[in-house]
Image (cartoon, rainbow, N blue to C red):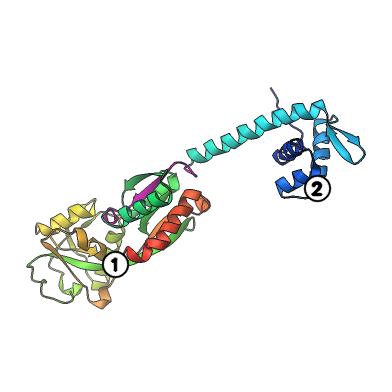
């Protein structure tokens, strides 16, 4: 069946028809639609041209709807209601303005940053349910682009023009060693003097792994990495157990095992991460993301 609707018949003109039918007056219809009486008048006549039959009788300067106008108004009301519901359903499937928000996060942000933001969102939008996905920077960036999550708490991705970022705080990378190691009493660690040490690290894709490589590039040698792991908690336990040294962001201080200490690196090895809320630019007007943005701007300074 070949369905065709004349191009003169638009959703806006159906809205004009309903406003006129419900108010019974051009001026009141224009006021309801925040437009001019001339625009309402033109819209109604254009609608008549589209349906190819008379919708109104002229009595002086007044318009009176015919039975045809009442019939079209009934259909228009159903069409607009169905389309509005269809748009809502479509947006919910895409994650826009749904009753849930899916947030991705680095493991290292789950002890303080994630709970703070989730609780603040609960106060702002009590009806909104939050789902959490953990992963590396690379995994979370791909999940954003795939539509698997709505926003991600991670480092700002490089060369990602499709991503909008709201910086939360900056974090220094520090030297992590077991308590009582030969580095314990140092105020700063000279990374170039650690060429003979064993190291453990996160797997590729984590922003801390990228900082790890950058720091050793400055130090001028390739570290002896004896083990890689997929989450920062396991990494800290490896250091605690004496498996090797590593580099960690300062934000993990509050969740470190007791047998691990963080020591600043010398200034020339200093690496800094910018942690941010990240989301697709195409989602920048989504109400749930706007609420999350507002929460992040308020809480950002207290999250470092």
Which residue is located at x 46 percent, y 49 percent? 288
Q: Does residue 152 show up?
A: yes
**Quarter the C terminus occupies:** bottom left
At label 1, counting other C-alpha atoms closer than 10 Å, the crowd grade (few under 14, some 14-19, many 20 or more) is: some
Q: Which element is circle 2 on? A: helix
Q: Residue 18 is drawn in which quadrant?
A: top right
Decide which of 270, 115 is in the foreground and name it: 115
Q: Where is residue 214 in the image (x, y as percent from the top left)?
A: 29, 67
**Which is more foreground, mark 2 or mark 1?**
2
Which residue is located at x 25 percent, y 54 percent? 203
Decide if residue 230 is on the left or right side of residue 47: left
Q: Which residue lies furthest to the right in this view?
A: 60
Above or below, 56 against 282 in this view is above
Span highlighted in magenta in the image: 95-110
Decide if residue 14 is on the left or right side of residue 126: right
Report the label total: 2
User: Which disc is residue 261 wearing?
Assistant: none
Q: Where is residue 175 in the image (x, y as percent from the top left)?
A: 19, 68
At label 2, counting other C-alpha atoms closer than 10 Å, the crowd grade (few under 14, some 14-19, many 20 or more) is: some
Q: Where is residue 218 in the image (x, y as percent from the top left)?
A: 27, 72
Q: Which element is circle 1 on? A: helix
**Quarter the N terminus occupies:** top right
The Cα–Cα distance between marks 2 and 1, rounded to whole angstroms, is 66 Å
Q: Residue 46 is drawn in which quadrant?
A: top right
User: Which disc is residue 214 wearing?
Assistant: 1
Magenta includes 254?
no
Which residue is located at x 83 percent, y 28 percent? 66
Which residue is located at x 45 percent, y 58 percent? 294
Identify the residue under disc 2: 37
């Amino acid at each position: 069946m070949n369905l065709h609707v004349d191009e003169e018949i638009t959703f806006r003109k159906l809205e004009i028809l309903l406003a006129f039918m419900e108010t019974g007056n051009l001026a009141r219809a224009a006021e309801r639609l925040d437009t001019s009486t001339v625009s309402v008048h033109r819209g109604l006549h254009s609608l008549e041209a589209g349906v190819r039959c008379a919708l109104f009788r002229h009595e002086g300067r007044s318009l009176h709807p015919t039975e045809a106008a009442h019939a079209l108004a009934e259909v228009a009301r159903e069409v607009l209601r169905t389309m509005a519901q269809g748009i809502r359903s479509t947006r919910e499937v895409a994650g826009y303005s749904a009753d849930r928000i899916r947030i991705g996060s680095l493991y290292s942000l789950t002890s303080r940053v994630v709970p703070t933001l989730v609780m603040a969102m609960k106060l702002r939008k009590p009806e909104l349910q939050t789902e959490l996905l953990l992963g590396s920077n690379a995994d979370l960036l791909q999940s954003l682009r795939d539509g698997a999550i709505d926003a991600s708490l991670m480092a700002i991705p490089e060369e990602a023009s499709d991503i909008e970022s709201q910086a939360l705080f900056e974090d220094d990378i520090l030297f992590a060693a077991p308590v009582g190691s030969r580095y314990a009493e140092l105020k700063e660690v000279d990374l170039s003097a650690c060429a003979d040490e064993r190291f453990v690290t996160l797997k590729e894709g984590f922003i801390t792994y990228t900082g790890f490589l950058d720091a050793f590039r400055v130090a001028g040698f390739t570290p002896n990495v004896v083990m890689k792991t997929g989450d920062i908690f396991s990494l800290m336990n490896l250091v605690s157990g004496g498996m090797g040294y590593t580099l960690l962001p300062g934000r993990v201080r509050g969740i470190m095992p007791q047998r691990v200490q963080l020591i600043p690196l010398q200034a020339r090895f200093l690496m800094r991460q910018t942690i941010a809320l990240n989301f697709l630019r195409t989602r920048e007007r989504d109400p749930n993301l706007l609420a999350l943005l507002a929460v992040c701007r308020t809480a950002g300074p207290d999250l470092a």
